[in-house]
Image: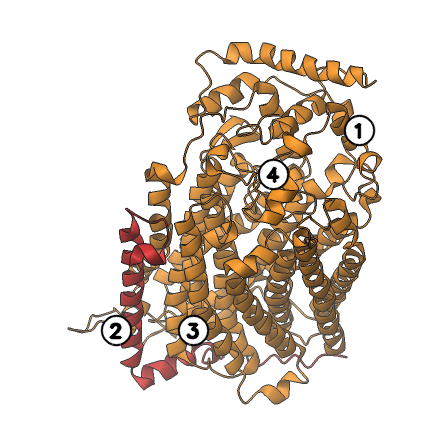
Chain colours: A red, B orange
C-alpha cells in the first residue's frame, strides 16, 4: 500500500511509513499533553509577555 | 522569597535595531536596481559587478540574512531577556555576534558582485564565509542557551521554543549544505553532485525559508503581538501544537522545489504530501496571531503598529496557503520557473517579514529611547506605502507568471508551439516588470520615511543602556513522580533542545538515506562524460556570472518543453555536476540542450550574443557581457580543480592534472579557428572561449551534437 502512495519507493517505503507513524505518534502525544494541561498553568503562560511590567508605560502616541 | 537585581542589556538591541534598518534599506535598494535591469538591460551600465546575475544573490542574501537576520536578533535580544528574566549570558558574545554578523554581510557584499559564489541559492557564499557563519551562529546559540540556563523564570514561553528551533535547525542545515571541497581561497566545489546536490540544496533552501524567515518570526509574533495588543496570546494550547507540528513537518517539504525534475518520484511525492500537511500548523499559528487581537480590533484603526502586524500575519497566512498549493504537481507545472514564484516569495518576505519587522521597530523605538514615537502620521504613511508597494509588486508578478506559463504551453490546433521563440514570451512581460519596479519604489520610499521617523525618535529621547529589574532566583526544578506533561519539557531546556533536534532531523534523514544509498535513484548513463578542462573552466565562468539566476538546465517531461528544448533531462546526465545548476527561474530559456539538435548554434553566434545579445536576438533583455571577450582567463588553478573533482568522484585519470592545460589549449584553439572562419579574431585564453566550450557541451551527454 505504501508503495502505491509513494510511487517508485520500492525497497525503502519502510522509511516513509515509519516517518508518518512517528509524526502521528508525536502529534497524538502533544494533543494528549495539551488536553491535560491545567487552566491555571495555561493562563500563566499566556500572560507571560504581559506580566513583565517593564515596558508598558511608554506610549507611542507620537509627538506629531 | 529573595529577590535578585539585574539589568537588561538594551545596547545590543539598539545595535541590531540600526543594523536592521540600514540593511533593510540596502536590500530594498538592490532589489529595485535589479528589478529595473529586467525591462532596461542597459541599467547595469555595462559593468560586470552590476549585472542581474551577480546582484540577484546579493539582493536575496541582503533581504534574508542582513535585513531579516538582524531583525531576528534585534527582536530576540529584547524579548528573550525579559521572558527569561535574565541579562544575556555574555555581553562579549553578544558583541562578537553583532560585529561578526555584520562582517559576514560585508563579506557577502564584496564577494557576490565579484562573482565569488557557489551558485546554490541562499547559500552562495564561499567556504571561508561559510565557516564564519557557522562560528558566529554558534556564538549566538551559546549566548542563548547560557541565558536560558541562568534564567529566573521556570518555564520557557513559546517564543523561546521558536528561537531554540531556529538555532538548532539552521546550524544543521547550514553545515550539511555547505560541505564543499576548496580549490582556492575563494573557490570550492560542492561535495554533492546533480540530483543529490539538488535534494540537499532544496532541503536547505526551503528550510532557510522555514527556519530563518518563519520560525524566528513566529517567536517574535508570539511576544510582540500580545505586547502591542495588550492581550494574552489567544490559545497557548494551540501554540504547543503549532510549534511541534510545524517544526516536524517543515523539514520534509524541500523536494516540492523539484517537482517534475529528475529527482526520483518518491522524493517529489514526499515533498508534496508534507507540504499539504503544513497548512494545518501554519494556519494554526496565523489564526493564533490574528485572534490575539480579539477585543483590540478598534485600536487597529488608529495604531500603525497593529496595522503592520495584521497585514504581516495575513501575508503569512496567504503565503503558507499558497506554498502548499504550489506543491501540487498540476499547480506547480504552471508556477515553477516563472515569476509566479517571485510573487509568492515577496508576499512572504515583504509582507510577513518586512511588515512585522517594521511593527517591531516602531514598537521598540520609544522603549529603547524612552520617548514617544516622533510621528504616528508618518508611521501611517509608511504603512500605506509599504502595503501599496507590496500590492503593486506582487500582482504584476502573478500576472507575469501566469502569462509566461500559458505562453510557454500554448499549441496551435495542429500541435505546433504558438510561441516557439522564447523571446516572444519575454517581451510580453516588460510592462509588468515596470509596474513591479514602481511597487518596489513605493516600498523603498516607505522604508526611507521610517528611517527619518526613527532617527527623529531616537534624537528626541535618551538611550537606556541598562534597564534595572528584580526577580526571584530560579528555584530548583523538581520532577513530580509520574508527570510527563508539556510543562515538564518547558522547564528543561536541554531535553527541549534535544527533542527539537530529533523532530527536525527525521525528515532529512529519511529523505537523504535512500537518495544516497540506493543506486537506482540515479541511473548512470554510459555516454555521459566528465567536462573537459576548458568546459570545466567555462562552467565556472557560468557560475561566476550568475547565469543560473535566469537560465534553468532542467527540461521537464512536458510536451511543451520537449517541443521547445528537446529530450527531457535525465538524472544520470548530472552525475559530474558539482554543483548542480538546474536554476529556479526562466527569465531566459532553458539551456540544457543548448549544445545539441536544433538549439545548437555556431561558436560565432555565442561570441556575438555575449558581446551584445540584441545583435542576435532583437529585443532581448539579457545584459551585455563585453568583458568576457576582453578578459584573459587565469588557468593557474586548473590542476587543483581537476584534482578536487577527482576527489569528488569525477573519473579524471590519475596524473591528468599535468595534461589538462594542454588539452584545454587544443580545444580552445579549435574554437578560435571556428571564430576566425566567421571573421572574428581572438585568442585561446579569453574567457569567452571557455564559455562557448561549456555552452556547446550542454546536452551532449545523451544526444549527438
Q: Is residue A38 visible?
A: yes
Q: Which quarter of the image is occupied by the C terminus of chain B? A: top right
Tell me the crowding category of disc 1: few under 14, some 14 to 19, or many 20 or more residues within 10 angstroms, Cα based.
some
Residue B589: % across, % down: 68, 43
Asked whether B521 or B9 is in front, the reply is B521
Residue assigned mark 3: B470
Q: Is residue A55 visible?
A: no
Asked whether B287 or B646 is in front, the reply is B646
Residue assigned mark 4: B566
Q: Are marks 3 and 1 in contact (CB under 8 Å)?
A: no
Subunit bearing disc 4:
B
Q: Quadrant of residue B457?
A: bottom right
Q: Which quarter of the image is occupied by the N terminus of chain B? A: bottom left
Same chain for the residues at labels 3 and 2, yes or no?
yes
Disc with the residue nearer the chain's start (1 vs 4): 4
- Quick one: SS at disc 4? loop
Residue B633: % across, % down: 68, 21
Asked whether B468 or B437 is in front, the reply is B437
Subunit bearing disc 2:
B
Tell me the crowding category of disc 3: few under 14, some 14 to 19, or many 20 or more residues within 10 angstroms, Cα based.
some
Q: CA distance from mark 2 to mark 4?
A: 59 Å
Q: Which mark is residue B685?
A: none
Q: Nearer the viewer, mark 3 or mark 2?
A: 2
Amino acid at each position: 500500500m505504501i508503495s502505491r502512495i509513494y510511487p517508485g519507493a520500492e525497497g525503502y517505503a519502510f522509511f516513509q511509513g515509519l516517518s508518518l507513524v512517528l509524526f502521528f505518534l508525536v502529534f497524538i502525544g502533544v494533543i494528549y499533553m495539551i488536553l491535560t494541561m491545567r487552566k491555571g498553568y495555561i493562563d500563566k503562560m499566556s500572560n507571560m509577555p504581559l506580566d513583565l511590567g517593564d515596558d508598558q508605560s511608554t506610549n507611542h502616541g507620537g509627538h506629531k | 522569597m529573595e529577590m535578585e537585581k539585574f539589568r537588561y542589556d538594551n545596547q545590543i538591541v539598539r545595535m541590531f535595531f540600526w543594523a536592521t534598518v540600514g540593511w533593510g534599506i540596502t536590500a530594498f535598494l538592490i532589489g529595485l536596481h535589479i528589478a529595473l535591469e529586467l525591462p532596461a538591460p542597459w541599467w547595469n551600465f555595462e559593468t560586470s559587478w552590476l549585472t542581474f546575475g551577480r546582484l540577484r544573490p546579493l539582493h536575496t542574501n541582503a533581504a534574508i540574512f542582513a535585513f531579516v537576520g538582524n531583525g531576528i536578533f534585534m527582536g530576540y535580544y529584547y524579548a528573550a531577556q525579559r521572558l527569561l528574566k535574565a541579562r544575556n549570558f555574555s555581553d562579549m558574545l553578544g558583541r562578537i555576534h553583532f560585529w561578526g554578523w555584520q562582517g559576514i554581510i560585508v563579506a557577502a557584499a564584496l564577494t557576490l558582485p565579484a562573482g565569488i559564489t557557489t551558485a546554490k541559492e541562499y547559500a552562495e557564499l564561499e567556504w571561508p564565509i561559510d565557516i564564519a557563519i557557522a562560528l558566529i551562529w554558534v556564538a549566538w546559540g551559546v549566548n542563548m542557551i547560557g541565558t536560558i540556563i541562568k534564567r529566573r523564570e521556570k518555564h520557557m514561553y513559546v517564543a523561546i521554543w521558536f528561537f531554540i528551533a531556529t538555532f538548532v535547525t539552521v546550524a544543521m542545515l547550514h553545515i550539511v549544505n555547505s560541505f564543499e571541497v576548496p580549490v582556492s581561497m575563494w573557490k570550492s566545489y560542492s561535495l554533492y553532485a546533480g540530483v543529490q546536490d539538488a535534494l540537499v540544496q532544496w532541503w536547505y533552501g526551503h528550510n532557510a525559508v522555514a527556519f530563518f524567515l518563519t520560525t524566528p518570526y513566529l517567536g517574535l509574533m508570539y511576544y510582540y503581538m500580545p505586547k502591542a495588543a495588550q492581550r494574552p496570546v489567544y490559545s497557548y494550547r494551540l501554540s504547543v501544537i503549532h510549534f511541534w507540528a510545524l517544526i516536524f513537518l517543515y523539514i520534509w517539504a524541500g523536494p516540492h522545489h523539484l517537482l517534475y525534475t529528475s529527482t526520483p518520484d518518491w522524493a517529489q511525492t514526499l515533498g508534496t504530501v508534507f507540504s499539504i500537511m503544513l497548512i494545518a500548523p501554519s494556519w494554526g499559528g496565523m489564526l493564533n496571531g490574528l485572534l490575539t487581537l480579539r477585543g483590540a480590533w478598534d485600536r487597529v484603526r488608529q495604531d500603525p503598529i497593529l496595522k503592520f502586524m495584521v497585514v504581516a500575519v495575513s501575508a503569512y497566512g496567504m503565503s503558507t496557503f499558497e506554498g502548499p498549493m504550489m506543491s501540487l504537481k498540476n499547480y506547480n507545472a504552471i508556477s515553477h520557473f516563472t515569476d509566479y514564484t517571485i510573487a509568492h516569495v515577496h508576499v512572504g518576505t515583504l509582507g510577513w517579514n518586512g511588515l512585522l519587522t517594521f511593527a517591531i521597530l516602531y514598537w521598540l523605538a520609544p522603549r529603547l529611547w524612552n520617548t514617544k514615537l516622533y510621528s504616528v502620521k508618518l508611521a501611517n504613511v509608511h504603512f500605506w506605502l509599504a502595503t501599496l508597494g507590496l500590492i503593486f509588486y506582487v500582482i504584476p508578478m502573478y500576472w507575469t507568471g501566469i502569462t509566461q506559463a500559458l505562453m510557454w504551453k500554448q499549441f496551435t490546433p495542429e500541435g505546433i508551439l504558438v510561441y516557439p521563440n522564447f523571446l516572444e514570451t519575454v517581451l510580453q512581460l516588460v510592462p509588468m516588470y515596470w509596474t513591479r519596479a514602481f511597487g518596489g519604489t513605493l516600498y523603498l520610499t516607505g522604508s526611507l520615511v521610517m528611517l527619518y521617523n526613527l532617527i527623529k525618535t531616537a534624537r528626541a529621547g535618551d538611550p537606556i543602556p541598562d534597564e534595572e529589574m528584580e526577580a526571584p532566583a530560579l528555584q530548583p526544578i523538581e520532577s513530580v513522580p509520574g508527570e510527563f506533561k508539556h510543562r515538564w519539557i518547558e522547564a528543561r531546556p536541554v531535553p527541549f533542545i534535544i527533542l527539537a533536534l530529533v523532530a527536525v532531523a527525521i525528515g532529512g534523514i529519511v529523505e537523504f538515506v535512500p537518495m544516497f544509498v540506493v543506486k537506482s535513484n540515479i541511473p548512470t548513463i554510459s555516454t555521459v562524460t566528465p567536462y573537459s578542462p576548458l568546459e570545466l573552466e567555462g562552467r565556472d565562468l557560468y557560475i561566476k556570472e550568475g547565469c543560473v539566476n535566469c537560465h534553468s538546465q532542467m527540461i521537464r517531461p512536458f510536451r511543451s518543453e520537449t517541443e521547445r528544448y528537446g529530450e527531457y533531462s535525465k538524472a544520470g546526465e548530472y552525475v559530474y555536476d558539482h554543483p548542480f545548476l538546474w536554476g529556479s527561474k526562466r527569465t531566459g530559456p532553458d539551456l540544457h540542450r543548448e549544445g545539441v539538435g536544433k538549439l545548437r548554434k555556431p561558436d560565432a553566434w555565442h561570441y556575438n550574443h555575449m558581446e551584445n545579445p540584441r545583435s542576435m536576438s532583437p529585443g532581448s533583455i539579457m545584459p551585455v557581457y563585453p568583458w568576457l571577450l576582453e578578459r584573459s582567463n587565469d588557468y593557474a588553478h586548473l590542476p587543483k580543480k581537476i584534482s578536487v573533482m577527482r576527489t569528488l568522484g569525477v573519473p579524471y585519470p590519475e596524473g591528468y592534472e599535468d595534461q589538462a592545460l594542454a588539452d584545454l589549449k587544443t580545444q580552445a584553439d579549435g574554437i578560435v579557428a571556428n571564430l576566425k572562419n566567421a571573421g572574428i579574431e581572438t585568442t585561446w585564453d579569453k574567457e569567452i572561449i571557455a564559455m562557448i566550450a561549456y555552452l556547446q557541451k550542454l546536452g551532449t551527454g545523451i544526444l549527438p551534437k
